C-alpha cells in the first residue's frame, strides 16, 4: 500500500489545524515587526536547505537519500512548533506567523530548490531523476494552501467553533504523525535499519547545525531571547508529513525510500528539540 493515502489526509488535517490558529494578529505581526520574520525565513528557506545539501555531499549519501534529505530541509512549518515555542517560553505569536508565512512561501521555493537538486544529483550520479514541477505545485496547493486557507476562514467566521475544533485536532496531531511513522517503518524496516547510521547522522547534524545557525542569526540581528528561542525551534522543526507526501506521491517521485530521511528526521527532531526545551526551562 502506498503511504500517500495515509499521509495526505494527515497532512491536510494538520494544515487545517495551523489555519485555525491564525488570526489578524499573526498577519499584523509580520508588518509591524518584520525583522524576526525575515531572519526566521532566511533560516528556514535558505540556511537549512544549504546545510542539507552540503551534508548530503560531504557524507556521500546515495542519490535517493540525497534528494530526501534536501526535501525535508525544504519543508518548514512543523505542526508542533507552536507548542514547543510555548514550552520554551518563546514568542508563540511569532511562531504562528512564521509557520503560516513559511507554508505559503514554500509553495514557490520548494519546487525551485528541488529542481536544482534533482539536476545536480542526476548530473553527478549519472541517473535521471525527473521532477514534475506542475504536479508538485498542484499537490502543494491542494494539501497545504487550501487547508490552511479553509482553517483561517473557519477561524474568521466561526471563532468559537474553530477554537473547539482546533483543541481537539491538536490532541490528535502527534498520534497521527506517530501512526504515519509506524506505518512507514513497517513497510521499510530493512531499508531504515540498513541505512540508519548514515541517515541518522545526517539528520542529527542537520538539526543541530540548523539550530546553531539560526541562533547565531538571531544574535546578529540582536533579537530578544524569547524571539531567538522561537526561531531556533521554527528552523529546526520541519513538516515531515509534507516531505513524505511529496516523496511517496505517485504523481511526483513515487519513492518510499526517498521519504526515509523525513521519518528519521521527524523522530530525531522531536527528541533533540524536547531536550532543548528541557534545558531552556531548567535555565529559567
Image: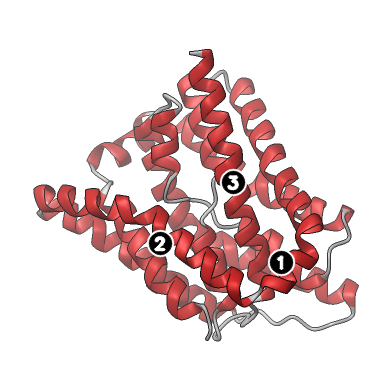
Q: Is mark 1 on a helix, strand or loop?
A: helix
Which one is nearer the viewer's eye here, 259 or 138?
Answer: 259
In the orientation shown, which residue stands out farthest toward the top? 284
Q: Which residue is drawn at 45% across and 42% down?
A: 81
Q: Which of marks 1 and 2 is nearer the N terminus?
A: 2
Disc 1 designates what residue?
192
In the image, taking residue 273 as reference, residue 175 lies left or right, namely: left
Q: In this view, does 209 lie above or below 126?
A: above
In the image, taking residue 143 as reference, residue 106 lies left or right, namely: right
Q: Which of marks 3 and 1 is nearer the N terminus?
A: 1
Q: Residues within 10 Å of mark 2 (few under 14, many from 20)?
A: many
Q: Are marks 1 and 2 in contact (CB under 8 Å)?
A: no
Q: Position of residue 84 (x, y in %)?
A: 44, 36
Tell me the distance, in whole angstroms, between the alpha carbons under discs 1 and 2: 20 Å
Q: Residues within 10 Å of mark 1 (few under 14, many from 20)?
A: many
Q: Quadrant of residue 249?
A: bottom right
Q: Is residue 140 above or below residue 236?
A: below
Tell me the distance, in whole angstroms, between the alpha carbons under discs 3 and 2: 16 Å
Q: Do the residues labelled 3 and 2 touch (CB within 8 Å)?
A: no
Instruction: Say which mark, if any, is on residue 269.
Output: 3
Q: Residue at x 70, y 82 (%)?
A: 130
Q: In which quarter of the image is residue 191?
A: bottom right
Q: Which of marks 3 and 2 is in front?
A: 2
In the image, taking residue 207 as reference, residue 78 lies left or right, namely: left
Query: Would residue 51 be seen by someone viewing this image from the given angle?
Result: yes
Amino acid at each position: 500500500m502506498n503511504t500517500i493515502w495515509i499521509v495526505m489526509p494527515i497532512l491536510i488535517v494538520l494544515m487545517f489545524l495551523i489555519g485555525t490558529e491564525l488570526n489578524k494578529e499573526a498577519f499584523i505581526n509580520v508588518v509591524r515587526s518584520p525583522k524576526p520574520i525575515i531572519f526566521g525565513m532566511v533560516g528556514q528557506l535558505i540556511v537549512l536547505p544549504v546545510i542539507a545539501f552540503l551534508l548530503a555531499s560531504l557524507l556521500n549519501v546515495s542519490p535517493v537519500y540525497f534528494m530526501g534529505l534536501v526535501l525535508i530541509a525544504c519543508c518548514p512549518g512543523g505542526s508542533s512548533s507552536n507548542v514547543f515555542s510555548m514550552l520554551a517560553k518563546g514568542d508563540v505569536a511569532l511562531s504562528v506567523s512564521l509557520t503560516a508565512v513559511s507554508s505559503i512561501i514554500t509553495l514557490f521555493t520548494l519546487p525551485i530548490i528541488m529542481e536544482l537538486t534533482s539536476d545536480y544529483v542526476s548530473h553527478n550520479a549519472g541517473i535521471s531523476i525527473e521532477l514534475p514541477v506542475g504536479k508538485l505545485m498542484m499537490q502543494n496547493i491542494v494539501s497545504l494552501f487550501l487547508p490552511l486557507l479553509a482553517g483561517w476562514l473557519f477561524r474568521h467566521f466561526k471563532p468559537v467553533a474553530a477554537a473547539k475544533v482546533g483543541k481537539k485536532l491538536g490532541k490528535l496531531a502527534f498520534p497521527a504523525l506517530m501512526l504515519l511513522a509506524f506505518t512507514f517503518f513497517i513497510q521499510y524496516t530493512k531499508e531504515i535499519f540498513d541505512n540508519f547510521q548514515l541517515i541518522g547522522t545526517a539528520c542529527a547534524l542537520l538539526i543541530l547545525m540548523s539550530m546553531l545557525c539560526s541562533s547565531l542569526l538571531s544574535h546578529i540581528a540582536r533579537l530578544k531571547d524569547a524571539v531567538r528561542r522561537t526561531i531556533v525551534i521554527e528552523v529546526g522543526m520541519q513538516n515531515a508529513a509534507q516531505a513524505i507526501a511529496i516523496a511517496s506521491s505517485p504523481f511526483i517521485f513515487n519513492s518510499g525510500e526517498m521519504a526515509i530521511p523525513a521519518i528519521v528526521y521527524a523522530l530525531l527532531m522531536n527528541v533533540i528539540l524536547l531536550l532543548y526545551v528541557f534545558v531552556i526551562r531548567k535555565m529559567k
